[in-house]
Image (cartoon, rainbow, N blue to C red):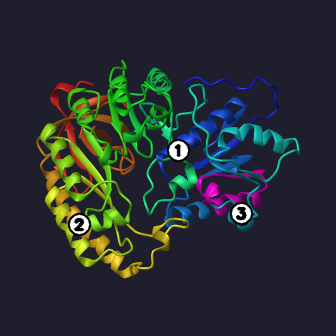
Amino acid sequence: MKHETSTTPASEPKKVHFVSLGCPKNLVDGEIMLGHLMRDGYVVTDDSSQADTVVVNTCGFIDDAKKESISKILEMAELKKAGNLKKLVVAGCLTQRYKEELVEGLPEADVFIGSGEFQNISQILREEEAGLGKKTYFNLPTYLQEENSPRVNSQPKYTAYLKISEGCLKRCAFCAIPKIRGNLQSRRLTAIVNEAKLLVAGGVRELNIISHDFTDFGWDLRKKETGASERPEALLAALSEIDGLDWVRVLYLYPDGISDEMIELIKTRPKLVKYFDMPLQHISNAMLKRMNRQMTREEISDRLAKIRQEIPDAVIRTQFIVGFPGETEEDFQELLEFVREQRFDRVGCFMYSPEDNTPAGRFEDQIDEEIKQRRHDELMELQMDISREKHRAFVGRVVPVLVEGLSEETELLLKGRMAQQAPDIDGVIYINDGQAAVGEIVQVRITDSHDYDLVGEIAQEDATH
């Protein structure tokens, strides 16, 4: 992707070091900030000790993410003592969520930018340089990425995240996202498709579609405008027709919005990866109701059965919360039995932690930490056994693999991912025989399996690459 840079002469370019924490949606916000800064003449450096400005793009979703964000801010603040660092900027969800507390508790930071102002980072830093700035920049989180928003893809050139909306329509009892990010705001379908084509023109072969819930895409626009074309199914159809794009993977599909038409598209369009990332959270009807989820166990089971009937080789990934207030041992055992019965390909498990200003955080029947830990470990042990069996079933199969480069473990191995493995959250495939270029998709014969990863060799028909 080409980005316009400032033509103003300068003796030394301004250097910025960027730290992005949390989810891919936050990462895209960081890429937009980088795009604005580079257009304004900044040079990005991976060495924080060489930076004039450091931006920490924080996450404020759960306790562990908050702690990581605070720790990283304090780590970067230490650079001031060395004398190079002039501005420490704290941005992102944690900043938006804890405005006053963060400003008061972190005097080491120079500027705080909320999630409603991050797109103005260049102007904010110019004001700072001119001595006209202030310490805090907060606004309602109503910014929606535009078609011409400058953005730097921070991922390897063959892959990118594509954010299609902001905010969330759901009101789950445990989640603070609507308070941080606001209500659902969908981008225009044409703008999304144009950005996707631009990314592909820059070498991207794999797009990972992100939002808080893909299945709600366009709901807000359709409500306001009769005949609005923004629908998740229409977006899938349009992306599947882009020349040069190999894989389109959708992340975060809530089960209540997965339509028969959507399943049919994923089944019949080769570029649409047969991968369903469905955050179910629980399966006990009592827990689903307390969580303010929109489906019953019976409805969820029907949707899963429909997916597997139409797409037998579909990969289904899900997440559960254990230790939610009021979860009884019977509720948990029902969840275990459901996981045993469904044999999901991937499962993430979170121990519930009370979040400020959420309904569940005010529930009285909170669960003891030891019980949460025991339930977490028991569920993940069960899933580990299922994962091992599913991985062993791949041995002997030949699968297309997107080559990512040399393994971090040893330069003797290449690594890559098959379509059923999403970046950063799923395992990888190590290639111990054969050569291929980074970003190339090659056929790999699986020869061995491990708990999370697979091992294979480039099949004979691709061995000449």
Tell me the SS state at disc 2: helix
* Residue 309, percent from left and from top: 12, 41
Figure disc tally: 3
Residue at the location (25% across, 29% down)?
Answer: 265
* Residue 192, percent from left and from top: 47, 28
What residue would you read off at disc 1? 27
* Residue 74, percent from left and from top: 66, 63
Q: Which of marks 3 and 2 precedes in the sequence?
A: 3
Which stretch did the figure color magenta?
Answer: 72-97
> Label 2 vs label 3: CA separation?
40 Å
Q: Which of marks 3 and 1 precedes in the sequence?
A: 1
Quadrant of the frame with the N terminus: top right
Crowdedness near tag 3: few (<14), some (14–19) or many (≥20) residues, C-alpha within 10 Å? few
Image check: 322 left or right of 197?
left
Image check: 108 left or right of 293?
right
Is residue 162 visible to us here?
yes
Give the numbered dot on residue 410. none
What residue would you read off at disc 3? 100
Q: Main secondary structure of the magenta part?
A: helix
What residue would you read off at disc 2? 335
